[in-house]
Amino acid sequence: MKKLISATLAASLALSLAACGSSASTDSVAASSEAASTAAKLDKIKVAVPNDTTNEARALTLLEKNGFFKLKADAGLTATKNDIEENPLNVTVDEVEAAQVPNVLQDEDYAVINSNYAIPAGLDPMTDALAMEDGSSAYVNVLVCKEGNENEPKIKALVAALQSQQVKDFMDENYKGAVVSVVENPTDGYDSSIDYDALNGETVSCAATPAPHCEVLEVCKDILAAKGITLDIQEYDDYVIPNTIVEDGQCDTNYFQHQPYLDNFNEEKGTHLVTVAGIHVEPMGIYGGKQDSLAPIQG
């Protein structure tokens, strides 16, 4: 409110001086009007967030950290917009299917977007995001299989490829911080406990979202091909089918989700999916739609 009053007074003063023959320029009036308009938008801030349980909570936590509102202390990993406790800026949260959030960005003041959807939408998380999670995010993207299949040699071969130095280098070179490997001791692409000769001619399938997951899997495809193993990459643009086809045995593995999402999915759907290995983190970011900075929020 103080900003609105100050901006309005500034505009009025500029107009008065101009009427009295002052040299105050039209640009000054325009700048003051723009400031008043920006301040006024504080009552109309709209933010889009993913609507799946864990990603919405993650997005709301990032928004809270950047001053949009305050969540209830016990909101936790299942927080929704109903857990907003203090909202002095009257922020409206729109819950949108995760893959569609980039498509509604132009209609929102801000949107919180997962990197795997930001990148194919032409957004660079490192330059376009107005704020991002730091590298300590607990939301590690994992390779998943059906419970009981964790020790299948072809799945272990895929793990070794995903945890390779080649994949780590690919992430560093291509995503420059938007996708960060969590593998502490990268392999040469292979697991010495596996009989690769026995796997020659075998196929291992993996369901994944387009970027970065399918792109990363292309690196693994070459690693496995050197041992005669075919990697069948099945691309999906949602967060449900990759889990259901692993659960019912149509696909060996999937690579698209983080651990909290998997835990919540198993609990809600009664599935029996387990993590085989942690691979990387994708810091979630706040992107500007109608706004090009966080100034209307942070002042």
Image (cartoon, grey):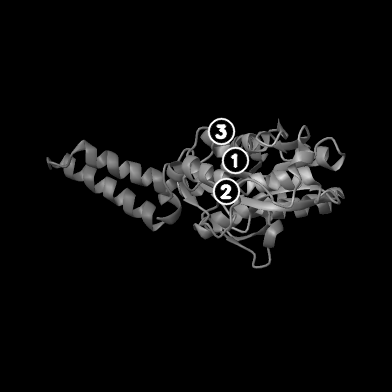
Amino acid marked by disc 3: Pro
Q: Secondary structure under badge 3?
A: loop
Percent from the top left, x then y, of residue 148?
86, 51
The residues bearing labels 3 and 1 have C-alpha atoms spaced at a distance of: 7 Å
The residues bearing labels 3 and 2 have C-alpha atoms spaced at a distance of: 14 Å
Return the mark for residue 282: 2
Task: Tell me which label, 3 or 2, sits earlier in the chain.
Answer: 3
Q: Which residue was labeled with disc 3?
A: 120
* Residue 83 seen anywhere in this rendered image of the structure: yes
Return the mark for residue 116: 1
**Is residue 57 shown above or below 106?**
below
Image quarter where the C terminus lies is bottom left
Residue at x 76% of width, y 35% of height: 200
At label 1, counting other C-alpha atoms closer than 10 Å, the crowd grade (few under 14, some 14-19, many 20 or more) is many
At label 3, counting other C-alpha atoms closer than 10 Å, the crowd grade (few under 14, some 14-19, many 20 or more) is few
Percent from the top left, x then y, of residue 55?
66, 50
Residue at x 23% of width, y 38% of height: 27
Q: Nearer the viewer, residue 130 or 40?
A: 130
